[in-house]
Image (cartoon, helix red, strand yellow):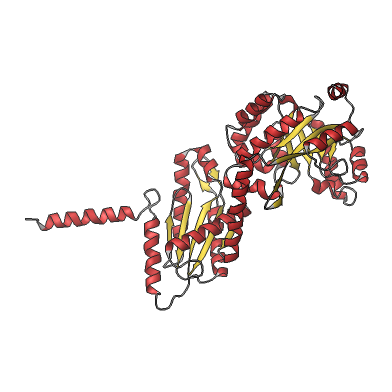
Amino acid sequence: MIKSADIAFLTVGQNELQAMAYTDPLTGLGNRNRMRDKVLQISSERASDPAPFTIGIANLDSFKPINDLFGSAAGDEILCQVAHRLKACIPDGALVTRHDGDEFAFVLPLIFERASAEKFGQMIREVLSAPYDLGDRNVRLSASLGFSIYPFAGEDCDELLKSAETALYRSKRRGRGQITVYSREIAQEMKRATQLEQALRNAIISDAIDVHFQPIVSLSNNQVVGFEALARWNDPDLGFVAPGVFVPLAEERGFIDALSEALLRKAAEAALSWPRDLFLSFNLSSAQLMDPGTSGSILSILGRVGFDPHRLELEITETAVMSSADTAHRIIADLRAAGVRISLDDFGTGQSSLGRLRDFIFDKIKIDRAFVSRINSDRASEHIIKAILTMCEGLELEVVAEGIEDYAEAVKLRTLGCGMGQGYHFGRPADGIATLRFLHENYYDPTMAERVSA
């Protein structure tokens, strides 16, 4: 015979199991199961009069590098602090849950339309941007958010979550700390991005991404000293797709390594036909500077092609360096040890460029075209360029001015003491065959002439 005490014990055990099934063990927040129940409850209550409500997803930007840098214990502490902040600021009747990893979700019964969802998102973004205390240090994070509104974005939890995830993905594509509310237009935009992604993946597999080369010249004599490799994609169905579209897409979808490796191989193979004193300049993405395997991959490609690492210059941006400074520092050190030179691209547009020059070892600075294009019309731009040139001379750094469009800009930069220039005034990007023709017409090298005559 089962005693009442046994029944009570079994009941307590069942309640504990149920609580565990609905609770995130790290933060104590509800989990996906709890969220589903909440959405179902609201939907049932409003079945006769389907008033709108909103669900949202918040994702911490660049949480993984911080977790890798400080360790999983510090990462868990940050997630617990995030949970505490979110519980403290959500309105009465609302629910906040934790999903996988660094993703949190909201059910907001009293938010009915886009403007209110965006206002709530702005509040959450501010709350999560305050420093996180890890004892001996503070760290800062931003958060991207996506929202979907019932019933316009879905009539059940799965549909609403899918729509919120679509909105969140669009926020991520636009940069850090962005807020997006789902709409049919956004869904179509994301659908096109997915189609573009598939076409790009196929183009990489079939080796259909081309490399073009833009000359870099010495401003003292207009002699070509090297070329920058630039990606070009002309799809049979999509037509010309700008690098500013497909390169960020490859970064976002996680296959920038495959694209970059294919482009570097093609560029290095083409550069083997150039005079040996010309260098090849190649761009690295922020994602590659967060991957410890990047230096080994680059040197392996150069080895297979037979291209001298001393002829390669890798261009990186300040933003890319800042994404994961310790990993980037190791990658740069490994590559420089092998003879590869490093250029800091778009100099002057970052928020702490001088700090980057102190913390990292560069060989060259590329002055951003935003200053170069106004050098003859804006005194501030001229003085900024003068200051950069003076500083680089003291640091023994070479300088390239980007985006030189006309003769007057080239003359002004040469007068100021800038060593090298790049832009349409000297040549537009061209494919490998046209680049060789350009060299035959604009560059004399006895060793090259011997190879051509042979």
Q: What percent of the width, then of the height, locates residue 306? A: 70, 23
> How many labels were placed on the picture?
0
Query: Which residue is depicted at the point 15% across and 57% down?
Result: 7
Residue 401 visible in the current orientation:
yes
Q: Nearer the viewer, residue 260 or 69?
A: 260
Query: Which residue is depicted at the point 78% across and 36% down?
Result: 432
Q: Nearer the viewer, residue 258 or 109?
A: 258
Q: What percent of the width, then of the height, locates residue 187? A: 57, 61
Query: Which residue is depicted at the point 66% across and 24% down?
Result: 303
Quadrant showing the N terminus: bottom left
In this picture, is 88 found above or below 398? Answer: below
Quarter of the image for residue 297 reads top right
In this picture, is 184 found above or below 64? Answer: below
Question: Image check: 332 left or right of 277?
Answer: left
Q: Nearer the viewer, residue 107 or 273?
A: 273
Question: Image check: 312 left or right of 86?
Answer: right
Q: What percent of the width, then of the height, locates residue 66? A: 53, 42
Quadrant showing the C terminus: top right
Quarter of the image for residue 277 reads top right
Q: Nearer the viewer, residue 173 or 232?
A: 232
In this picture, is 411 found above or below 296? Answer: below
